[in-house]
Amino acid sequence: SENKSEQKNPGESTYKFFQENSNYFDEIELVSEQLAKELSYDPFNVHHALVSRLENRLGYKVETLPVEQTGDSLRLWNKEEKEILLSQVLDFKNRNFHLAHMICLIEFPDVIKELTSSYKFPNLEHEIHCQTELANYFAAALLMPYKSFQDQAEKCRYDLDRVAAAHAVSFEQVAQRLTTMQRDNQKGIPFFFLRVDKTGKITKKFNAMSVNIAEQGDSSPVKNIHTSFRTPGVILPQVIELADKQKYVTFCRTTERPVYSVATQDRRLAIAMGCELRYASRIVYADTLSV
């Protein structure tokens, strides 16, 4: 059944590919670090640097348009006219992420394609989906450079709000980036990441652990992830025990979606992160738990 699910769902193929690589891609990290140096990376002035790279180095026009012109799309890429059109519904944190994503696709497609070239995906659609997620990985690595990001996370004991503020990114962007801190000799805590909608459907997952916590016979064994919808924006810590008797510390919080109109206001998702209980002393959210 796992193989059938993987063949139907590009997300499952991508998840498997990422997990087989320990959710870490050194080639992308190195390219993004070099680009950050070229851009004289500063998290609070990065928007201008990204736009300048696209316009002056890559020859693209970057424009932000009202939703009446972009519709349901957050980003439009016009290759022929060399235009990148962003929707006004994106806040600056997400605009920066989309611009960094586009720089990867335009300037470094060979790096991405090389990573997926030898992997046997069910079909081209699945491979393209994986390449899109690798471009997202690049964007995160560029906006949250490995060493400064990992140092800040350890310094504030993985207080995600403080890490987000230090890098001018969103809570969710930090959460996903933390699953990639697996560089040799500079490893962070191996986290899993889950994102679910109100029905309990998993919309995204990443895992730097060996255990596949997202496939424990339930949409999610992290029960607080469902409770978090009743307390928007509040981080809920919890200790869970799986069937193998292994315990994990988890923390959950809602995350907002872009709002296009009155009809699209309440589209929150919930995210959960967790790791083995032995890392609890390094995580500020675990201080309120009896561990």
Image: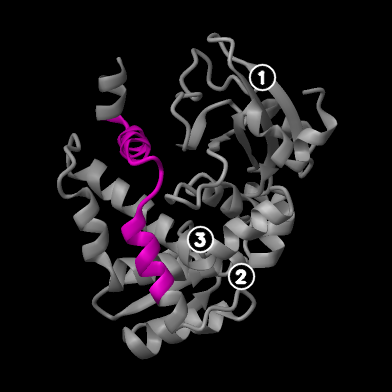
Q: Looking at numbered disc 3 in the image, what kind of residue is underneath it?
A: Tyr
Task: Tell me which segment is drawn in magenta.
Answer: 8-34
Circle 2 sits in a helix, a strand or a loop, which is it? helix
Q: Kindly report which numbered mark, 1 or 2, lies closer to the viewer in this rendering.
A: 1
Q: Looking at numbered disc 2 in the image, what kind of residue is underneath it?
A: Phe
Q: Position of residue 66 (x, y in %)?
A: 55, 71
Against 14, residue 201 (above or below) is: above
Q: Residues within 10 Å of mark 2 (few under 14, many from 20)?
A: some
Q: Earlier in the sequence, mark 1 or mark 3?
A: 3
Q: Say the numbered circle drawn on residue 181.
A: none
Q: Position of residue 112 (x, y in %)?
A: 27, 58
Quadrant that contains the N terminus: top left
Q: Nearer the viewer, residue 248 or 56?
A: 248
Residue sitting at the far right: 288
How far apart in space, not on screen, are marks 1 and 2 (Cα)? 36 Å
Please state if 217 lies on the left or on the right of 284 as rendered.
Answer: left
The reply to whether callout 1 and callout 2 are in contact (CB within 8 Å) is no
The reply to whether callout 1 and callout 3 are in contact (CB within 8 Å) is no
Q: How is the image coloured?
A: one colour
> Which residue is drawn at the image coordinates 29% and 73% (left, top)?
107
Against 228, residue 158 (above or below) is: below
**Which residue is label 1 attached to?**
240
Q: Residues within 10 Å of mark 3 (few under 14, many from 20)?
A: many
State whether residue 69 appears in this view: no
Residue sitting at the far bottom: 56
**Which residue is label 2 attached to?**
92
Q: Looking at numbered disc 1 in the image, what kind of residue is underneath it?
A: Ile
In magenta segment, residue 131: no
In magenta segment, residue 24: yes
Where residue 283 sits, quadrant-wise, is top right
**Which residue is label 3 attached to?**
146
